[in-house]
Structures are given as structure tokens and as C-alpha cells.
């Protein structure tokens, strides 16, 4: 496995040049675009790493499946599904268009920004700070990493420039999808997106999903298998946004990308995978990260379809 990962990173390192780092959140533009790294954590507890595996980057949309898990734990699925649907959109991650045209007036799924903002509003806590701390504690627990924290500069940068997310949140509030204060909900959403992780942390979360909620190190059940199935189904159908169909054909495993350059994947009963390559394609997915995962999937026969 180690040899394979080293070969793949070496082979695709140069392809980072075909992508570009996200610049609509100004702080992300400072990232070195040439980085590429991977961690694989298998369900036997072995960790394999290659390239820039231990560089910290912000989770961005990879926080969405994790916060969804916590929202399910906090509220149960009936209440969560009152606020978000179960269908892919085929639209970009930050699209606002279906909010008005889709007649149920709730976001189609919790992997797009509108749905994720609705889910952030469901996290229990009296203040945004309490909610964010609960999210952070949950992530620390499932990654076995107490050093996880928020990148304040990235948070402030998105808070200052996130006009589209802000408009979506107000729109959601108007049709009753968000209970409570809109700005407080956005604070939670922007902060969860600014949580810093490494590929190792993502591989740990992926491996936990690969065991449907049973911690690999302690063997403790951290959430019901049903919630794991819900989250993985969303990852499989909507995790790469309007690139989800192509990803299913070329890689074929549940995955979630973020504009920080990370991709988190899970392979049932086998492994969790974390990839980092901040140069993105036009759909906001890591350019080289996709190449790495395609080749890894072929070599290890990971495709589940
Ligand atoms: N924080 C980002 C946003 O809301 C997350 C988007 C993403 O990672 N695709 O725009």
C-alpha cells in the first residue's frame, strides 16, 4: 500500500497545475497550489500516508456530512428531513435557483450550501459559540485529534465575503426553514467550514463511516448505523456536487469534497481515505485529488457499483 500511494502521488503531483485554488474566499487564495497528499486508514487500524498528508487545510464542505451526523444525533431523522430533501441537484454547490422553483421550498439535499445552512441551524446549543464548540468536540472525538481548531483568518474572510450564502440563508428564513437568528446560523456555518484538518483526520472519519459508526480504536459505537447509511448515501449521490455522477463512474465510492482542496472517502468495511490538493477544477473539486482517487480505486478495486 505504501509503495502504491507513493507512486500515485509522484505520478499526479504535476497535474495540480491544471487546477486553481479557490479565490472567492480571499484567504484561501494564499494556499500553495502545488500540494498533494493522501492518508489511508484501514479498518484494521493501519495508517498509510504519502505527500503533503499532514498539512492543515480547512474542511469547507467536508464539514457538511459531519455536521449532518451531529444534527441527526441531536434531532433524529424525521426533524432533519423536515428541513432538507433527499435528492441530488446537478447544480453547483452554491446555487440558489432551486430554492424558489422547487415547490417544497426546502433545499434538495444537505450537501449543497443551502441544505447545509439549514442543517447548521439544527445543531443544539443556546449560542453560536456553544453550537460550534459541540461541532468541534464531535470532530475531535471522531478523529481522535484534540488539536483540531478553527482557522480564524479563513472564517473572517468568508464572513466578510459570503454574500451569496447570506442571501440564501435569508431566503431560507423567509420560508420558515431556519428557526432562530440568521446571522447566528451563518456564524455556525462559516465556522464549521473553517475547521482545520489534515488528510489523516479525514481518513479517520472515512474509516468510522466504513464501520458504520463503530470507532476503530475503542470499538465504541458513536452513532447508529442508520445515520451512517444516510450520510454515505448523500455522499454517494451529491458529495461532489455537479461532478457526482462522473465521480461515481470513475471512482465509485461515497466521497465529499471541499473548496479547501480536501476530499474525504469511505469504503465499506475496508478503509477511509483523505486526500488534499488545493488546486480545484471548475466544479470546486480537487483536480489532482480526483486523479489520485481514480487510480487508487482502479488498483485496489474499490468501486462499489
Ligand atoms: N464555505 C464554502 C462555501 O460556503 C464551502 C463550499 C465548498 O467547500 N464547496 O462557499
Image (tube, helix red, strand yellow):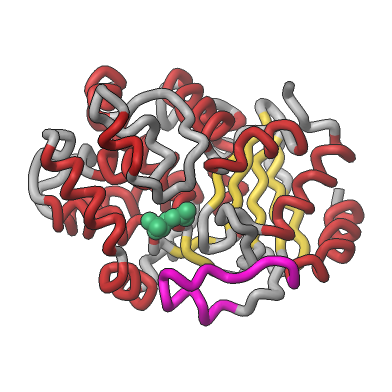
Image position of 69 (left or right of 286):
left
Q: How many marks?
A: 0
Residue depicted at 71% across the width and 63% down the height: 37
Image position of 204 (left or right of 111):
right
In this picture, which residue range is highlighted in magenta? 17-31
Residue 10 occupies quadrant: bottom right
Q: Position of residue 39 (x, y in %)?
A: 69, 54
- From where the camera sits, is residue 73 visible? no
Up/down of 144 relative to 179, above or below: below
Could you say which is closer to the camera, residue 265 or residue 209? 265
State ligand 1's quadrant: bottom left
Could you say which is closer to the camera, residue 113 or residue 12? 113
Residue depicted at 41% across the width and 70% down the height: 25
Q: Position of residue 85 (x, y in %)?
A: 35, 25
Q: Position of residue 124 (x, y in %)?
A: 18, 40
Up/down of 18 relative to 172, above or below: below
Up/down of 64 relative to 200, above or below: above
- Identify the residue at the far front of this view: 101
Amino acid at each position: 500500500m505504501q509503495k502504491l500511494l507513493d507512486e500515485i502521488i509522484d505520478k499526479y503531483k504535476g497535474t495540480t497545475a491544471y487546477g486553481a485554488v479557490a479565490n472567492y474566499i480571499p484567504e484561501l487564495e494564499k494556499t500553495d497550489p502545488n500540494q498533494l497528499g493522501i492518508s489511508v486508514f484501514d479498518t484494521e487500524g493501519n495508517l498509510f500516508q504519502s505527500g503533503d498528508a499532514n498539512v492543515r487545510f480547512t474542511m469547507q464542505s467536508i464539514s457538511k456530512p459531519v455536521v449532518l451526523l451531529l444534527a441527526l444525533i441531536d434531532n433524529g431523522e424525521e426533524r432533519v428531513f423536515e428541513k432538507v430533501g433527499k435528492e441530488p441537484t446537478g447544480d453547483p454547490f452554491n446555487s440558489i435557483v432551486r430554492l424558489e422553483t422547487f415547490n417544497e421550498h426546502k433545499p434538495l439535499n444537505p450537501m449543497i450550501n443551502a441544505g447545509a445552512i439549514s442543517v447548521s441551524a439544527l445543531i443544539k446549543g443556546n449560542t453560536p459559540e456553544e453550537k460550534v464548540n459541540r461541532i468541534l468536540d464531535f470532530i475531535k472525538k471522531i478523529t481522535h485529534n484534540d488539536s483540531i481548531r478553527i482557522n480564524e483568518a479563513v472564517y473572517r474572510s468568508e464572513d466578510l465575503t459570503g454574500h451569496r450564502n447570506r442571501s440564501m440563508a435569508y431566503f431560507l428564513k423567509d420560508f420558515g426553514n431556519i428557526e432562530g437568528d440568521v446571522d447566528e446560523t451563518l456564524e455556525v456555518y462559516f465556522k464549521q467550514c473553517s475547521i482545520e484538518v489534515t488528510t489523516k483526520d479525514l481518513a479517520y472519519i472515512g474509516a468510522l463511516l466504513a464501520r458504520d459508526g463503530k470507532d476503530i480504536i475503542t470499538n465504541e459505537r458513536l452513532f447508529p448505523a442508520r445515520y451512517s447509511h444516510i450520510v454515505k448515501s448523500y455522499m454517494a449521490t451529491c458529495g461532489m456536487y455537479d461532478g457526482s455522477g462522473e465521480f461515481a463512474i470513475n471512482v465509485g465510492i461515497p466521497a465529499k469534497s471541499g473548496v479547501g482542496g480536501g476530499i474525504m472517502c469511505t469504503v465499506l468495511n475496508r478503509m477511509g481515505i483523505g486526500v488534499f490538493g488545493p488546486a480545484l477544477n471548475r466544479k470546486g473539486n480537487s483536480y489532482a485529488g480526483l486523479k489520485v482517487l481514480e487510480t487508487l480505486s482502479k488498483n485496489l478495486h474499490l468501486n462499489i457499483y
